[in-house]
Amino acid sequence: GPYCISNIIRKFNCSLEDAEDLLIDAILNFRDKAISDKLSYLSSVRNYLYTTCINMKKEKDYYTFKKREKEAEVTLFLYDEEDELSEYNSELLQLSLESFKKLSESCQRILRLFYIQHNSMTEVAKKLGLANANSAKVKKARCHKKWLEIVKKK
């Protein structure tokens, strides 16, 4: 117990409470695997629990990152200047806007036309002089992907 907790706190710079929660989840995971006889070879319960804690923390951090990335994307388009934003939402908005400004002008334009001005793909194609709605859809998808790549680098 204390070995896992102290090392998790040091490795991930997290709170005692978060480290204890991870350890409890790891113990429950161990119990479930032991009951279902899925632990074929185990040299050290301590190492198993510690490794499980690390893997759970990394997985949780990954999903938190993905959630933040998605929220940043949504925040840009749903932001209403009248709303009071929490510090977290302000950070997400800032991240979104900074990342958006790094896109090419044509990417910014297509994303604005679709997400902010709510044009259909056919309307977007006409306004940008593209061949058809499918061309607009492909361009929008590429620009959206570029934007997310910039967000991920922040």
Image (cartoon, helix red, strand yellow):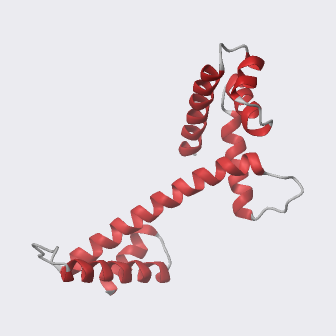
Q: Residue furthest bottom?
A: 1
Decide: is 147 above or below 132.
Answer: below
Where is residue 123, by image quadrant?
top right
Q: Residue furthest right?
A: 82
Describe residue 123's horizontal placement relative to residue 149 as left or right.
Answer: right
- Report the residue at 56% width, 29% height from top: 142
Q: x and y percent of residue 115 in the render?
A: 73, 38
Describe residue 143's horizontal placement relative to residue 47 as left or right.
Answer: right
Q: x and y percent of residue 58 in the render?
A: 40, 62
Where is residue 122, by image quadrant?
top right
Q: Nearer the viewer, residue 100 or 110?
A: 110
Q: x and y percent of residue 34 in the render?
A: 19, 81
Decide: is 67 above or below 8.
Answer: above
Quadrant that contains the N terminus: bottom left
Q: Nearer the viewer, residue 65 or 6?
A: 65
Q: x and y percent of residue 12 in the render?
A: 43, 68
- Report the residue at 33% width, 86% height from top: 2
- Report the residue at 50% width, 78% height from top: 15
- Report the residue at 61% width, 24% height from top: 139
Describe residue 89's horizontal placement relative to residue 150 as left or right.
Answer: right
